Amino acid sequence: MIKKVITLAEKWFGMEREDIQWFPTIDNDKCTNCETCLKKCSHGVFENINGKVKVVKPFNCVVGCTGCDPLCPEGAISHPPKDYLVNLIKTINIKNRCGCNCKED
Ligand code: SF4
Ligand code: SF4
């Protein structure tokens, strides 16, 4: 299956990328700064700043991708639950279909 990559310049189901809270979080108590995530992600989400791997461009994370989570040897990376996106899509669909102009809010 071909996955479409949503860039910052594009909208996701009509939403601005910055309005979608989908990005990785690093548990600093677990992270050993091994850079596995940094090397895996080709979207510039991570950076090593003074020896500490950090999420520097969270909204570059591809909506729906969790590719780096299972690669972290320490289990230090997490994303929101998929239900977050499912509920977001439901909300968008309701707004687009109900015809009461609520999508203009
Ligand atoms: S892969 Fe995990 S342990 Fe390694 S730098 Fe990334 S978050 Fe830290
Ligand atoms: S989930 Fe995918 S796009 Fe997002 S930071 Fe990890 S590898 Fe990069």
Image (cartoon, grey):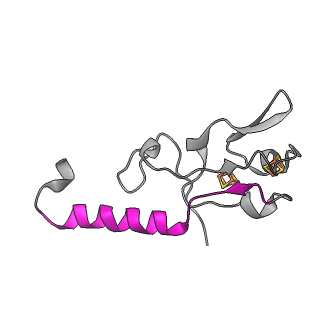
Residue 64 pos. (x, y %): 56, 61
Q: Is residue 5 magenta?
A: no
Q: Which residues are magenta?
A: 75-99
Q: Hey, which quadrant is residue 67 in on the image?
A: bottom right
Q: Hey, which quadrant is residue 69 in on the image?
A: bottom right
Q: Residue furthest bottom?
A: 1
27 vs 44, nearest the viewer? 27
Residue 5 pos. (x, y %): 57, 54
Q: Is residue 18 above or below residue 96?
A: above
Q: Is residue 54 above or below residue 95?
A: above
Quadrant in the picture for the N terminus: bottom right
Q: How many marks?
A: 0
41 vs 85, nearest the viewer? 85
Residue visible at 86% across and 59% down?
Answer: 73
Q: Residue furthest front?
A: 29
- Asked if residue 37 lies left or right of residue 88, the reply is right
Residue 89 pos. (x, y %): 38, 65
- Asked if residue 52 lies left or right of residue 20, the reply is right
Residue 55 pos. (x, y %): 68, 40
Residue visible at 54% across and 56% down?
Answer: 63
Q: Is residue 15 above or below residue 3?
A: above
30 vs 68, nearest the viewer? 30
Residue visible at 54% across and 52% down?
Answer: 22
Q: Hey, which quadrant is residue 97 in on the image?
A: bottom left
Name the magenta segment's main secondary structure.
helix
Q: Residue furthest left?
A: 100
Q: Is residue 38 above or below residue 83?
A: above
- Asked if residue 53 lies left or right of residue 60, the reply is right
- Asked if residue 13 lies left or right of residue 35, the reply is left
